[in-house]
Image (tube, rainbow, N blue to C red):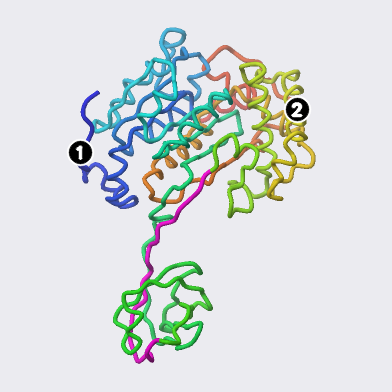
Amino acid sequence: MIEGQKTIDQNLYSRQLGTLGLEAQGKLIKMKVLIHGLRGVGIETAKNLILAGPNAVILHDNGLVELHDLASNFYISEHDVGKRTRADASLPQLKDLNPYVNVDAYKGELTCDYLKQFDVVVFTDFYDINKLIEFNEMCHSQAKPIGFVLAGSLGLYGFTFVDYGDSFRVFDRTGEELRSTIVVSITKEEKGIVTVHEDKKHRFTSGDHVTFTEVQGMEEVNGKTFEITVVSPYTFSIGDTSKFSDYKREGVATQVRMPEEMKFRKLEASLLMPIPQGKHELDTADYTKSPDQLHVILNGLFQYHKIHHALPNLNNEKDADELVNIVKEVNEKNKKSMDIEGLIKVEAVNEKLVKNVAYFARAQISPCASFWGGIVAQEVVKFTGKFGPLHQWLHYDCLESLPEGNVNRTLTNTRYDDVIAIYGRETFDKLQTLK
């Protein structure tokens, strides 16, 4: 591997610098990342991350290319099927994306000792739960924790899990521009009230921190940082000002960016207690659906894989029925543990949802892979401390896009079989005639 980038190419990364800033980009160019799994999610993650510019991205996928992989991995071809591993077939074009990033493939066995050299490890479409728990335990327990990201795309359902250790510091949660406002008065009392100019709302929120400059009279506030409580769009409280001098005139209140500490649970604990302390629900991209159900189903999928060392077969009713039974058993067994915080509520398993996950679990299509690959690469970049990372699960499905009625899902032994397995021949034929 060649020596990585030492300085930031501000021409190449000009737009990214506008979003991340020099501090985060400076951390990113020193980062070494492993990506395991190069089906759709893995290849999208690798592509996005290499373009972002870490020091090194090491690929790991010793599985031979299969014909259906062509539905989601755009860097492999029919000539690779059965002849090359997904990592070897994808490597040349990934290398060409960014000359500043060391991109290579590792062909050996993944072990805890091997993983210790990385800043972040990413596992995509990997369901050996015992191995995942072993690797996550090691990453979490390091003196300087190794970032651990797990993601999968199972037909029209997918998930991402993030663990950045017991004490992860975020120096800029939102990336928003710091706000400032003109002060017109500060009361002298136990809950000192700051009033801003009537022409412009302050736009602060409770819990923000501000500092003051140019205040005359109550000069004790100048240069100090206060946590505020919003009273109205034009007023906020800064706490006890009763012992300060009287406010006379002028002053500017400016928002201060304060670092935040985030605590992450290990994977094994988070499977049972997925809602971190301080949160009240699982994250979701669609609040009309229940991520709680999907989380229980994922627990069941891990158990199914432990039994069969594989995911349910495509559109297989027997496998789907078995997964339903496993999910029900898992839900009953883990219900008390999952509900220990009084937040996870899965009284009855949604059998139709479980079956739809089972039917298509082995399929990957580009739109879903692109969605999850974008999220995973984004979470890796957040290991720099810029922007708040996912805390800790995201479950999402788009099963409402399934066609209604009877559908012909007979496979054709082509690169499009994963699309046909999900949407059927009728929809696929329509797609092929679109201009």
Q: In the rendered view, does 87 fall on the left or right side of 398?
A: left
The crowding category of the residue bearing disc 2, from other C-alpha atoms within 10 Å (few below 14, some 14 to 19, many at least 20), is many
The structure residue drawn at horizontal position 50% and vertical position 77%, both measured from the top left corner, is 233
255 left or right, relative to 5: right
Quarter containing the N terminus: top left
Magenta span covers which residues? 244-264
Residue 88 quadrant: top left
Residue 30, image quadrant: top left
Residue to which mark 2 is pinned? 324
Q: Amino acid at mark 2?
A: Val
Q: Cα distance, mark 1 to mark 2?
A: 52 Å
Q: Quadrant of residue 421?
A: top right
Identify which residue, 88 or 27, lies in the foreground.
27
Mark 1 burial class by Cα count in 10 Å: few <14, some 14-19, many 20+: few
Please check the rendered image and state whether residue 295 is part of the magenta-colored stretch, yes or no. Answer: no
Along the line of sight, the residue nearer the viewer: 116 or 254: 116
Whether residue 257 is in magenta: the answer is yes
Q: Secondary structure at mark 2?
A: helix
Q: On residue 30, which mark appears?
A: none
Task: Label 1, secondary structure: give it.
Answer: loop
Q: Give the overall secondary structure of the magenta segment.
A: loop
Instruction: Return the x and y of residue 242 as percentages of the image width and height.
Output: 45, 87
Tell me the amino acid under the disc marked 1. Lys
Give the percent coordinates (x, y) of residue 40.
48, 27
- Of the numbered discs in the image, which one, if any, rests on residue 6? 1
Residue reaching furthest to the right: 348
**Of 182 and 211, the residue lying toward us:** 211
